[in-house]
Amino acid sequence: MPSDLPVPEETPSPTPTPLLSNISDWNPYSMLPTPTPILNHTSILKNDTPNYRKVLNTSYSGSVGLAGNAIGKDLNITTGPFSITYTVHPNISSPRDVWVKLSVFDPWQNVLAVGGYNRGYPNEEIQTMTLYREGRYYLTIEGDFASVDYTIKTGDLVPVNIQNQTPVSSEEMFPEEMMQ
């Protein structure tokens, strides 16, 4: 064996940038696109995911005024679970006329989660819905005589804010300065 051959250098593999969840507007009055079929389903019973609580970070916040209309959001969640926390602010003094309904659909238009305010739903002004899987979802917010503030929290990492830190200098005096 010749030992004169150079040792091959290992090229470091770059760390992949994490995929962040994408949340965009969607018209709830339009038809949903035909989803691509999933050929391989993994069982939730045979899962290597550790069973510990995951910290959810705010990915999107918004507010909407509702007057008998609906708005929609297209949620492409890359790191699950995710939660939707919403606060209802009634715009009129008669609480019986105020109502809000939030629905989360999968691409096949199956209803996965429903929450709301009044009309058969609790009348608590702050509520949270949690879904435990990542994927493509559609959120519809509809109601009347109310405004809604909502926050979508996902398992995405918090973007690191890099700041230039100035070193803290100790106020030591040199012997020359002590003489003056």
Image: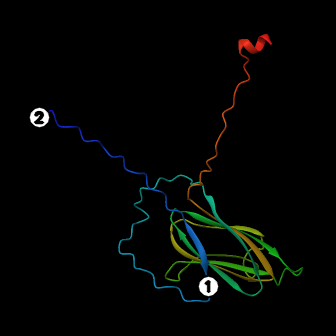
Badge 2 amino acid: Pro
Image location of residue 34, percent across then percent down: 46, 85
Quarter of the image holding residue 41?
Answer: bottom left
SS for callout 2? loop
Image location of residue 164, percent across then percent down: 64, 43
Q: Nearer the viewer, mark 2 or mark 1?
A: 2
Q: Left or right? Give the position of 137 relative to 168.
A: left
Badge 1 amino acid: Asn
In this rendered view, identify the residue nearer to me: 163 or 78: 163
Q: In percent of the image, x 82 and y 84: which residue is there?
A: 97
The N terminus: image quadrant: top left
Mark 1 closeness class: few <14, some 14–19, many ≥20 residues within 10 Å: some
Q: In percent of the image, x 44 and y 64: which residue is there?
A: 44
Q: In percent of the image, x 57 and y 53: which residue is there?
A: 53
Query: Which residue is identified by label 1?
Result: 27
Q: Left or right? Give the position of 29 relative to 92.
A: left
In this rendered view, identify the residue nearer to me: 97 or 68: 68
Q: Is residue 103 above or below residue 3?
A: below
Query: Which residue is identified by label 2?
Result: 2
Image location of residue 99, percent across then percent down: 76, 81
